[in-house]
């Protein structure tokens, strides 16, 4: 049973992308991916972003997946969380979070729509 967390970081004038770039270039992302229990840690840009014409905000999506809650708890206890929190402050980012638990079972009726 994997736990996947979608974190949407929103900032102004490229701040969210700068945050993700610094997370990668500093080696923090690589360290997180190497942690026991990490299954996925990837940043994405939305294809379509809904915003007002005069709004300079932008969003980046982090898909963060772990084997179980224990792995997440161990990750949250690492010094990297301080680094991440400091970078969030540096770039003045705001977040929304969605959490999903995988059942690892694809229903037969859904398999017809999956192209391998």
Image: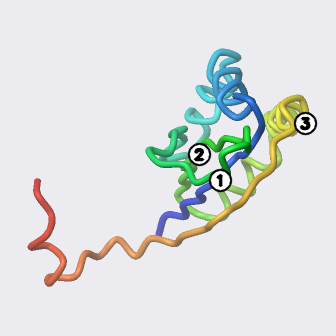
Regarding mark 2 in the picture, which secondary structure is present there? strand
In the picture as drawn, the residue positioned furthest to the front comes out as 53
Residue drawn at (77%, 36%), measured in percent from left and top?
A: 12
Query: Contact (CB < 8 A) between labels 1 and 3?
Result: no
What residue is disc 2 on?
62
In the image, taking residue 18 as reference, residue 60 lies left or right, namely left
Q: Residues within 10 Å of mark 2 (few under 14, many from 20)?
A: some
- What count of labels does the image hold? 3
Among the two numbered marks 3 and 2 on one chain, the one whose residue lies closer to the N terminus: 2
Residue 79 pos. (x, y %): 84, 34
What residue is disc 1 on?
7
Regarding mark 1 in the picture, which secondary structure is present there? strand
As drawn, 82 above or below 4? above
Regarding mark 3 in the picture, which secondary structure is present there? helix
In the image, taking residue 60 as reference, residue 9 lies left or right, namely right
Q: Please tell me which residue lies in front, 96 or 25.
A: 96
Residue drawn at (67%, 61%), measured in percent from left and top?
A: 70
Residue 25 pos. (x, y %): 64, 15
Query: Contact (CB < 8 A) between labels 1 and 2?
Result: yes
Q: Please tell me which residue lies in front, 32 or 60.
A: 60
In the picture as drawn, the residue positioned furthest to the top comes out as 25
Query: Contact (CB < 8 A) between labels 3 and 2?
Result: no
Residue 2 pos. (x, y %): 49, 64
Residue drawn at (52%, 72%), measured in percent from left and top?
A: 101
Per the model, the C-alpha gap separating discs 3 and 2 is: 17 Å
What residue is disc 3 on?
89
Among the two numbered marks 1 and 3 on one chain, the one whose residue lies closer to the N terminus: 1
Q: Please tell me which residue lies in front, 75 or 18.
A: 18
Q: Residues within 10 Å of mark 1 (few under 14, many from 20)?
A: some
Among the two numbered marks 1 and 2 on one chain, the one whose residue lies closer to the N terminus: 1
Residue drawn at (18%, 77%), measured in percent from left and top?
A: 110
């Amino acid at each position: 049973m994997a736990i996947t967390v979608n974190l949407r970081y929103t900032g102004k004038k490229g701040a969210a992308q700068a945050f993700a770039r610094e997370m990668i270039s500093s080696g923090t992302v690589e360290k997180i991916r190497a942690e026991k229990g990490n299954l996925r840690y990837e940043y994405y840009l939305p294809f379509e972003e809904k915003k007002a014409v005069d709004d300079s905000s932008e969003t980046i999506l982090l898909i963060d997946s772990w084997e179980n809650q224990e792995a997440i708890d161990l990750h949250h206890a690492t010094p990297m969380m301080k680094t991440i929190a400091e970078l969030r402050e540096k770039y003045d980012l705001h977040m929304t979070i969605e959490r999903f638990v995988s059942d690892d079972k694809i229903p037969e009726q859904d398999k017809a729509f999956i192209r391998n």
